[in-house]
Amino acid sequence: MSEQFRLQIGAKRQVTLPVRLLELLALEEGSEIQIYVDKEHATLVPMVSVPRHLVSRALLQEMESRRGLRSSDLTLDEFATQIGVDAKSEARRQEILAALSPRERALLEIIDESRTPATPSVSHNKHAPSTRKKPAIEIEN
Amino acid sequence: MASEHNLIVDLRVKEDILAYLPPLRQQIVGFLMRLAANPFSPDIIDHSIQPYPNSFYYRLPSGCYVFWEIVYLFVTPSVGSLKGVFVRITGARFDFDRKTASELLL
């Protein structure tokens, strides 16, 4: 059985979700929802937080479809050359890293993380996360 | 220990990362070198996810994921030897499409 809810947007763009809606969707304070907008319709989907080291099923499937040896495969040297990385200097860097203790390597990784851009340089990437501020959602007590 | 000749890269990985900035490309190649040296190193395996048999991925500090498969050219690889073992890189990508746990568990 489907149910409908009519909500009013209040001051500061806030919306109060009815308790019944929270029960139906198993939501509680602190839960996240995502709203998909398609033209004049919107769908609200409850979200579950997942560890960030797990990748999406779509990406996993795409990578799985690439399995299997191919005649076009590149050696590591060919690959590094074609993407403009000096393999010899990187190999030297790796030798130096290998001589470090695990703690020193972990510290370097933190430094690397702060230096390396977390996103590709392509500015028109349609999948890039939005930086727009989300309106707050107030939950009815 | 494996040599760099035991690591091969799917041509499509080049397309994956050509848009990335040089420091990130260098980070990816650095990780591939570690993989080439020993794909079964605890440093790598203990921090990797194995979603399917002989298929792995690892999250770099930048958030980029590197995917690879282990290819055995011999039916029975001898214990402790990497002869006949190839690492084949299948991808190096960010995951901007990751949405929900339900999607992961479908």
Image (cartoon, coloured by chain):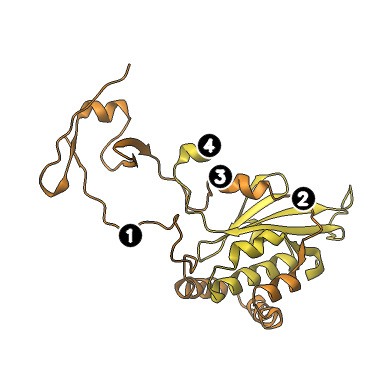
Mark 4 — on which chain does it sit?
B
Q: Give B28 or B74, whichever is nearer the viewer.
A: B28
Q: How many marks?
A: 4
- For the N terminus of chain A, the image quarter is top left
**x%, y% of residue A76?**
74, 69
Residue, disc 2: A68
Kindly indicate whether the residue at mark 4 contacts the one at mark 2 (C-beta within 8 angstroms).
Answer: no
Q: Residue at left 55%, top 68%?
A: B19
Disc 1 crowd, CA 10 A, few/some/many (<14, 14-19, 20+): few
Label 3 crowding class (10 Å Cα cut-off): few <14, some 14-19, many 20+? some
Please name the color used to draw chain A: orange
Q: Check the image and name the residue furthest to the top.
A: A1
Q: Which residue is mark 1?
A: A131
Q: In terms of sequence position, does the residue under pointer 3 or pointer 2 come before the other?
A: 3
Q: Label 1 vs label 3: CA separation?
A: 23 Å
In terms of secondary structure, where does tag 4 sit?
helix
Residue underneath mark 4: B105
Tell which subunit mark 2 falls on. A
Q: In terms of secondary structure, where does tag 3 sit?
A: helix
Residue A9 drawn above or below residue B59: above
On the same chain, marks 1 and 2? The answer is yes
Query: Alpha-carbon neighbours of circle 2 within 10 Å: few (<14), some, or many (≥20)?
Result: few
Q: Which chain is yellow?
A: B
Residue B3 makes an appearance in the image: no
Residue at x 21%, y 48% (from the top left corner) = A136
Q: Disc 1: which chain?
A: A
Please determine if labels 3 and 4 lie on a single subunit. no
The residue tagged 3 is A58
Question: Quick check: do tags 1 and 3 share a chain?
Answer: yes
Q: Residues at marks 2 and 4, common chain?
A: no
